[in-house]
Image: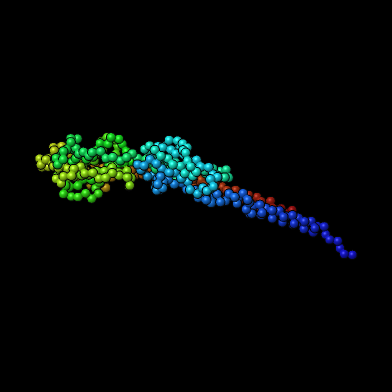
Amino acid sequence: MSPEPSVLSRKWFVLAAVASLLLAALAALFFLPSRRNAAVQPLATRVLNARQTSPDGEPIPWGKAMPENSVRLEVTGLDPRGSEPVEFTLSKDGAPFTEIEHHGNFADVAQLQPGKYRWSALIHQTNGDPMLVEPPRGDPFAPDFVISPELTLPPLRQHTLDGGEIGPNRQTKYGALLGTVMPYGVPGALLEVETKPAAGAFDGTGLQRIPAHSGDVSASFVGPDGAYHWRARLVLGSDHQTEWRNFAEGSAGDFIIFNPPEEKQNPPKDTADNQDHDRQPQNDRHQGDKNSDKTRTVYSRTGPPSAPYSSGMGSGHHEPRPPTLKQKNLPSIWHLALYRIARLFGIFIAVLAVMAAALKLIQLSRRRTPQPR
């Protein structure tokens, strides 16, 4: 008779088969792509960009200041079928964002008032997850574009340093104030002033720049004796400025600087007094150096002086007195004494422990030694 198959081997075979099926199901669940992931993947890999252009289609650099008041805001990379609604929002001078009208993936905004603007777009995707698209700002608070008022340079004027008006080709002491009067301020704008000797030509170097705020906007110029001419312009960005304007077209110069000869030869009395006053601390300083050398000599031979040690750096400055021998060695003596006491105490405890251990060993050896009968 043939032996019957073992029941145990069949059970192991069934368990191995079930385990293999479970592992295959888990591998299919975690590693095979699903239909949902395949549908969302194209939306995740696409690129959505925000851009701003003029009505003619010319790109507007981020943060640019411009006099035009019409801008087109657009989002690229959307579904061309228009199945994803877009919401455009706009903010002026830090105010809350408000929704604006748009057509598909772009919005045309016109008749904007001067100010700093920021904008963003919200895309409602087909999978239900909204996506916010914003311009690539380097600074989170920087404007995306600036609408500036029309740059107009008012008439130029020149005054003395005391505020008196200087006529063309007139004299002034020491220097002059060159500029204009702005009827209103232009945020971010600068008044550039270039001054040259009357015999020299303008070359765009040595400019003075003043913020174009409301009211008097002038640059002070001081120079040697002679005739000078100057010009100015308003600048708001590298590509937004007015034309250069000369104060006068004459070749003799716009103003003439002179210094009174008596003031050149005889300086004011307070100036001489100030020089004497400035010279006195130097003498005191040299005297202090001599005293400090003597003090160092006495200290090196006889010990620390009773008065505070002077370093020769002027009155009111004293270095701390060097510590005496007793003050210097007192902490170290106490520390050394405590260290020695602690070491002796430790040695004493160690000797007691060794003696106790020896006595214990002796008692144990006596107990184990057989007593003679």
Q: Residue at x 38, y 37 (%)?
A: 113
The x and y percentages for residue 277 are 18, 39
**What is the quadrant of the N terminus in the image?**
bottom right
The x and y percentages for residue 71 are 41, 43
What sort of colour scheme is used for the picture? rainbow
Q: On the picture, is 270 further left or further right than 325?
A: left
Q: Residue at x 47, y 46 (%)?
A: 75
Q: Residue at x 32, y 43 (%)?
A: 236
Q: On the picture, is 371 further left or further right than 205?
A: right
Q: Residue furthest right?
A: 1
Q: Count how many numbered circles sit on residues in the image.
A: 0
The x and y percentages for residue 136 are 44, 46
Q: On the picture, is 73 further left or further right than 85?
A: left
Examine the image and state in which quarter residue 233 appears: top left
Q: On the picture, is 223 further left or further right than 141?
A: left
Q: Residue at x 17, y 43 (%)?
A: 254
Relative to 11, does residue 86 appear above or below in the rendering? above
Q: Return the residue nearer the eye: 188 or 10.
A: 188
Q: Residue furthest bottom?
A: 1
Examine the image and state in which quarter residue 219 appears: top left
Res 241 visible: yes
The x and y percentages for residue 25 are 69, 53
Res 348 visible: no
